[in-house]
Structures are given as C-alpha cells and as structure tokens.
Amino acid sequence: MQQVQIDQLRSAVIPPQQLFLGGRPTDALGDARLDVLSPIDGRRLTTIADGDTRDIDLAVKLARQAFSHGGWSRSAPAYRKKVLLCLAELIEQHALEIAVLGVRDNGTEIGMAYKAEPLSAAGTFRYYAEAIDKLYGEIAPTGRDVLGLVHREPLGVVGVIVPWNFPLMIGAWKIAPALAAGNSVVVKPPEIASLSLLYLARLASEAGLPDGVLNVVTGRGASAGEALALHMDVDALAFTGSGAVGRRLLESSARSNLKRVHLELGGKSPNIVFADAPDISHVAKVSANGIFRNSGQVCVAGSRLLVQSSIYDRFMDQLLSATARLRVGDPLDLTSDIGAISSTSQLRRNLDAVALAQEQGARRLIGGEQLLADSGGHFMSPAILADVAPRMNLWREEVFGPVLAVTQFESEENAVALANESPYGLASAVWTGSLSRAHRMIRAIHAGVVHVNAYGGADITVPLGGFKQSGFGRDKSLHALDAYTDLKTAWIAL
C-alpha cells in the first residue's frame, strides 16, 4: 500500500448507489435518496437509496425464495466452501479499493482500515468457508434398540444490522457464518457507511453466490431497520450497535414472530495497569492506541484507565507523551495516526462529554478540542481526563469517541470494584507481571473479553461478546455458528 495508490483512488467518482437484491443492483421502490457526506471534508460523495418497508419486504421475499429453492441451503458444504473461498480471494484482490472507499465513507485512518476492513473480512470468510465442511452432527448414547441423531440445519432468512465504525469487518462476522451454514441474508447497512457492504454484495455475486442469497437494503434505521426487525418471515436478527436500539430490536421480536435476536452492544471497557506491569512505556503506548485509534470509535476501546497509585505519576507522564505524538489528520494520509469522527452529530456528542466531565469535577489533561474545522471535516484531538469518579457520566456512559477517563486505585480488590462499576461488560485489560494475579483478575472482571498484557489483537478463533448491558450475542469463532443453525433431533426405533 503506497500513498500514490491511495491518492489515485481518493478522487474516484462514486455513482448513485442502488439496492442489491436478487443478485443484482436494483432501484428502490421509492424515489427517496440519502446523501453520503464524507467526514474528511464534509462534501457529498454520492447518494444511496433510502429503502423502506416495501424494499425490505422484497428483499426478504427473494431471500426466502432462494432458501426454499435449496441451491444454497441444501447444497453440499464443499460447494459453499468453494464459493466463500472465492469471495475471500476477490475481497483481497480489491482490498485497497474497498479500504479507500470505506475511509471516504466513515473516516477511519487508512492504515487501520486496510487491515480491519477488507483484509479482516477476507480472513473471516475464509475461516468459515474452511470450517463448514468440518462440523459433524451427533449420535446420541442411546440403548441398542434406538438410534438418536442430532442434525444442524440452517435457520432460513437472517437479518443483519451493522454499525458505521467497521461495517465490513463486523458485517463479515455475521454474514460469513450465516452464509456458511446455508442461510439467506438481508443486510441493512448503516446509513452513513453503506458503500463497502454494497461492494461486498457485488463481489459475492461474482464469486458465484446464488441470486437472492445475499441482499442489501440501504436506508434509515427507523424505516428499513425497523421493518427488518418486525418482519414476520425473518428467522433471526444479528445486530451490533447501541443499547437503545438493541432494546427496540428485542421489542420488535416480541411484537412479531419471536425471531432470535443476537446483540453485541456498547462498552465502557476498563484498562487496568498494576505497578508490576512490564515496560511502562510500552503499556502507555498500547493504552493510548487502545482508546484513540479510529478516533475512539471502537466498541471494545479501553475508555476507562485504572492506574495503581504507586506508579500513577510516572505512567501518566508516559501516556501524555504517547498521546501528544499521535497525529490527527486526513485519514487517507499514511502519516495520520487518527482519522475523522464519523459525523457532525458524533463530534458534538464527544465535545459535550468532555465539557460535562469537567463540570462534574474531572481534570482535562490534554485534548478534547475540535481540530481542522476549516477543512469541513470532523476532527478532534484525543482527550484525557483525570480524577474521574464512578458517579460521573464519563465513567458510566459510552462516548464512542477519543475520550479517556482516568482514575487511580490502591489494591487489587479496589481495581476489581472500580472495573465492575459499570452497566457494561464487553472488554477489559490487565497489565501485570504476576501470573497468579492475571488469572485472578480474569475470573473477577465481569467482561466477555479480558486481555492480559495486551489490548486488542484477539482474532477470529475466539468469540467476541459481552456481559450485562453489552449484550449476549457472540461473534467470531466456531461458536458463532450456533446463532445461525438449529438443532434437529431424529429418534429412530430400530
């Protein structure tokens, strides 16, 4: 990846986007369009169709027809494997084009976007392609006069709703296992970051995925998203996003056909640094990246920092130095460490969170200001606030921006209590040189992921999901296939 290649792609004209239904780009049934504004400069990139209930109905109908036809749902796993491996290859072939398209759409710095979006998505499709012909059914331990078999079967039509921060990566976490298991899928992308998922659908068709198996309906959450959630012929819904929307999706399931709902929601993840942590300078650098990369727009971001008092001053000096070295700027410039905030509304929420924290008694040590306003884009300096107490909003509420809340702790028990003082339980980290302490903390922290002497880096082989109000869905690993398959018992008298 070279800057000259990026610069050639950054000015490419993007035509008005259609829906993707039945294996081809298709006009929406209504005339409404949504502007796609780049967070880099505020300019309009293109428009997308503002799909509504009628378009969701058509997408689900096509998905159901494809499922019932059986060309995908009842095909041999080896065939599905071949198609999904081809799709993974196509994603990799077009990786830079997809990455630049996505950065223009949502503002993630290109170095991160290239790895986290197309390359990660290709790896995810390859993982589930390779897994699907290696999963076996079961023979129950019955008496000799009975044969008990347990079969795995696809659910039918799966709805997928993904967020704007990493739409392709998170979309692949849901779409890949759903397709590998034999389901048909209807995707509602985020209205402010739909372009990469439309691109994915076109590549899937090129790879040989049968028509109607993967459909994409762009539009607003309040119309297209709600219609998908309420649809009586959708068997399951996989969602990553806010807790407020997650609650509405559960209500929609209850109001409709009791479809399965798999939720990965918000986080306010604690990053805990003990005095015996190895290499304080390294820990500070990783901790800064753990909250500030992608402008803090990461569900597992380490947004609460807990530092043991005996090393607090020394560690904070290192953290402030690491943060000051981060360059905020054009996300399509390879020298930028931090890109743009996704939208003007998200930028305002970030700035308001910093102001409120100061009103409640927190001390702003660095950052928290709008940058590069003359560019027309949405940029913010990474903010660190100290003396943040559990009673403060910044300790309890997810900002989803480059805002770090910091506090001190004395003992291991104190650290556990502070870490768990949150309605969320998605991710966490512990830095320590003690193996015994690491294992104790893994047990004690109420979170779906506990990093030890690291922050981030967990790959497709392990599940991602949370406790408490971070939801109960699980993406990644072989466990994700449980969300997209049903168990059927065959009880055979011999």
Image (cartoon, rainbow, N blue to C red):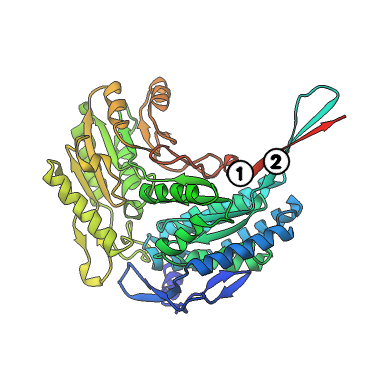
Can residue 96 be seen in the rendering of this structure?
no
Q: Amino acid at mark 2?
A: Leu
Can residue 194 be seen in the rendering of this structure?
yes
Q: Amino acid at mark 1?
A: Leu
Q: Secondary structure at mark 1?
A: helix
Farthest right residue in view: 494
Q: Are marks 1 and 2 in contact (CB under 8 Å)?
A: yes
Q: Secondary structure at mark 2?
A: loop
In this view, the residue in front, 312 or 90, is 90
Q: Position of residue 455 (x, y in %)?
A: 39, 40
Is 56 rendered above or below residue 263?
A: below
Q: Position of residue 269 (x, y in %)?
A: 34, 39
Which residue is at a point 44% across and 36% down the rendered structure image?
449
In this view, the residue in front, 12 or 280, is 12
Instruction: Classify residue 292 as left or right of residue 461.
Output: left
Q: Position of residue 101 (x, y in %)?
A: 45, 68
Numbered tag placed on residue 252 in the rendering = none
Which residue is at a point 21% across and 26% down the rendered structure image?
310
What distance separates the C-alpha of mark 1 from that of mark 2? 10 Å
Number of callouts: 2
Residue labelled with disc 2? 135
First in sequence, mark 1 or 2: give its number: 2
Q: Position of residue 192 (x, y in %)?
A: 39, 65
Residue labelled with disc 1? 481
